[in-house]
Image: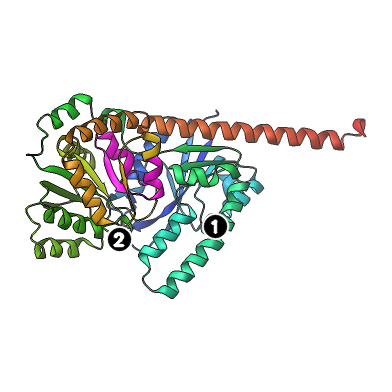
Amino acid sequence: MPTNNNLTILQPLQAKLLPDGQVLLTRKLIEAIVELNNYWDGSITVMMEESQFENGNIDQKVFKINELPFNLEVISFDLITPALLKKHHSSVVLAVPGYRQNHIAQVCKLAGVPCIYVSEYTLKTRNQIASVTTSNPIMRLRKLLWEYNQEKKQCKAIVMADGLQCNGTPTYEAYKHINRNPLFFFDTRISEDMLATEAEIEKRTANSSQAQPLRLLFSGRLVKMKGADHLLLVAQELKQMKVNFELFISGSGDLEKTMHKTIAANQLQNVVKMLGVPDFKTEFFPFVKKNIDLFVCCHRQGDPSCTYIETMSCGVPIVGYANEAFEGISAMSETGWVVPMNQPKVMAQKIAQLSQQREAIKSMSFKSLHFAQKHTFEKTFKARVEHMQQVIAQSRQAQEATENRLSEETNPIFA
């Protein structure tokens, strides 16, 4: 591939520009581009829309624009034109289906540049998010109708696109039939050197018995969408059932202050520990590998959270609500325990049962690690870049075939 090829990425998260040539971005974005650079033979341009506010992600960080591992262009997606893509020598465009980018497939088609959509949310998941985050019934109905209309536009865009990369099983099952080049992957930032080892699992579970507290974990944004409001309901049920447990909660969000008050009001301080937001690589990940028996996932919608595969990378199995994302990864990996949606009492009952089955948890720990080993950061991004290259090659072949056909039709020799 020529080295002047440019991979153009339309990042849906907005950038907040700061004084002195700085910008507020997420750690995950930077790490993803660094990994892409290992496989992409060319330059990378990331286009983002501007925001005056912080994005609310727990891994946000200030970066100097001139030190970023890619070219950053802050621009309204409405202003992306065929001429702009040609100016950047774009070989392929990665976009995200949604109301801000559904038109990009058409722009790419006019520019003669292949477009690959990266999908994360199905209509079902988006409806779940709207239901959880909108209490007003009229506003909720309006959101659901809006999402339904957007789905039609989104599907039209995916059909037009040259390729599709699906994060998680839900969007793969929903859209793989309407695009000619679909790829399935699990989003993760866990490199091979970060994976737990079988020896670490053996050490962690060596003294595991009913006499020892079952060590539970949740990590992520402390918001209703992620089911953070159910975590303490689960803890209260476990306490009433006299289960020997500890629950560690890592993250921040809208519910954080309320959760602290609830812990105090229900005298849960001895069993529930709020960890805040420790450094992911140096503090949090080593802590999980060494200390956690089971991840409690009360996600109330099926977004393809990287939490699933990253937790399994620690050799830690998951007990979670039956959202479509966890159901999908649980079935594929044959790991974890699925409980009915929005049932914290049933979740607590399952955890109480598992507290009596420590060997089952240990066995599932090994199975979780073995599945995660197949979906590391390196393997995932290598496969995604190979898919991009295949799409580019197919697009060029199709363009050459079209040009040859048009040439033959206009050549008087063949008249």
Residue 364, position in %: x, y?
Answer: 26, 33
122 sits to left or right of 263: right
In the picture of the structure, the residue carrying the numbered disc 1 is 151
Q: What segment is highlighted magenta in the picture? A: 305-329
Image position of 64 (left or right of 204)? right
Would you say residue 13 is visible in this rendering?
Answer: yes
> Where does the C terminus fall, quadrant-wise?
top right
Task: Name the mark on residue 367.
Answer: none
Residue under the point 48% across and 42% down: 166
- The x and y percentages for residue 13 are 40, 54
Q: Does residue 284 appear in this view?
A: no
- Residue 185, placed above or below residue 126: above
Q: Quadrant of the N terminus?
A: top right
Closer to the camera in the image, 95 or 77: 95
Tell me: residue 376, above or below residue 172.
above
Membership of 318 in magenta stretch:
yes
Q: Position of residue 321 (x, y in %)?
A: 32, 50
Q: Which residue is mark 2?
A: 224
Q: Amino acid at mark 1?
A: Glu
